[in-house]
Image (spheres, rainbow, N blue to C red):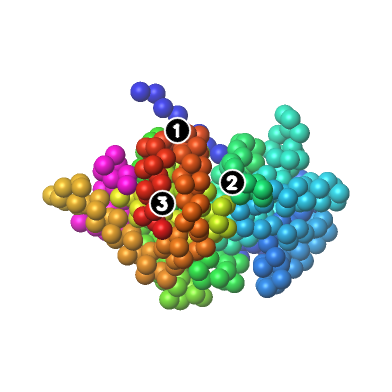
Amino acid sequence: MIREYKFPMLEKVIFGVGSLAKVNDELDRLGKNRALILTGNSLATKTDLVQKLENLLGDRWAGTNSGIRQHVPSQTVTAAAEQAREINADSLIAFGGGSPIDAAKIVALELLEDGQPQEAMPQIAISTTLSAGEFTPFAGITDEDTRVKGLRTDPRIVPKTVILDPEVTLPTPKQLWTATGMKAMDHAIEAIWSVNPQPVTDVLAMAAIRKLHRHLPVCIQEPENLEARGECQVAAWLSIFGLMNVGVRLSHIFGHQIGARWDVPHGITSCITIPHCMRFLAPQTLDQQVMIAEAFGVQTDGRKPEDVAAEAADTVEAFIKSLGVPTRLRDVGAKEDELPIVAEEVHKESAIWHSQQGGQESLLGLLRQMW
């Protein structure tokens, strides 16, 4: 069987302590002089990082939009695109977590005219969490009226450059860092049990799980440990390396709809969904779940795959609980009477990803287990 592996239009990843200082070199390389920073209110007002970046850019700084909010409400994207036009921005710098990064992608898509290449509105992504959205040509955006999250995709909207500097993650709240670390774990697990697996992605996903399993707890115990933070950043990169090739199967789809409807951070949705999805998918993914178990250090030799898969789910669940994050829908503001609506939207999105996993009733049953 002939298969293909597509590489994104990402050109460079700069990683390591102090790599933020390379941002001007990248603007020079891209031939851009008027950068608009897209970020969130917390990073802009509760830290000095945004001001530090503005000062670093100097004459290349054209403006800052700090109105980006969780799950990227569509009105915030419209406002950011209008600002980019008004100031004649020629490039975008996403600074923050998954929401500013997704917002920058969709703003770029709004600004790129039909047929224009990626170079017409390139992005530099500077990530402060482990959500890893900076590596993909996908972006989520939420309709404020329906509270349903949609997906935009275009190969031109992946950033040209990604900067992973552990120092800029130090002010990131512990729970946000931890939860987005589990989001990266979710990326890796979904890659391994994908309906479209790839050998390159399998190897990198297993490496990501091992790194996160080892270094994420260190970040909690030693918040200033830049080496552990850097290892988690690399793990997030490895976890999502092949997403555009393998897609997602179920946990992410639940996360998209849970997050948008009840304003639950994506990392937290992964903490809730992963163990339940592991058990639900076990009958169809036993071989893949053995791989996941191996990455977590579970003994697999000479054992029935069913037993290994069961222990893998228990191990992942215990790991999540040890991180001190929410693990139930009832604890994050979800409304029980809206579970059928979410099941319906998950069913619809599953069709888009070609990963249909039973009917709405079975999905609703899984949501009730998460409740």
Report x, y in % for residue 330: 45, 63
The residue that disc 1 covers is: 354
Q: Inspect the image, locate mark 3, and give the three-letter code of the amino acid beneath it.
A: Leu
- The Cα atoms of the two marked residues, 3 and 1, are separated by 20 Å
Q: Which span of residues is magenta-colored?
A: 280-299
The mark nearer the N terminus, 3 or 1, is: 1
Q: Secondary structure at mark 3?
A: helix
The residue labelled by disc 2 is 148
Mark on residue 8? none
Question: Residue sitting at 50 percent across and 39 percent down?
Answer: 349
Residue 166 in picture, x, y percent from top left: 55, 65
> In what element is the residue under mark 1?
loop
- Give the number of the disc on residue 367: 3
Mark 2 burial class by Cα count in 10 Å: few <14, some 14-19, many 20+: some
Q: Residue at x 80, y 58 (%)?
A: 63
Q: Position of residue 289 (x, y in %)?
A: 29, 47
The answer to whether residue 249 is magenta is no
Residue type of the residue flagged with mark 2:
Val
Q: Quadrant of the C terminus?
A: bottom left
Give percent across and percent down for residue 85. 83, 46
**Residue 188 visible from this viewpoint:** no
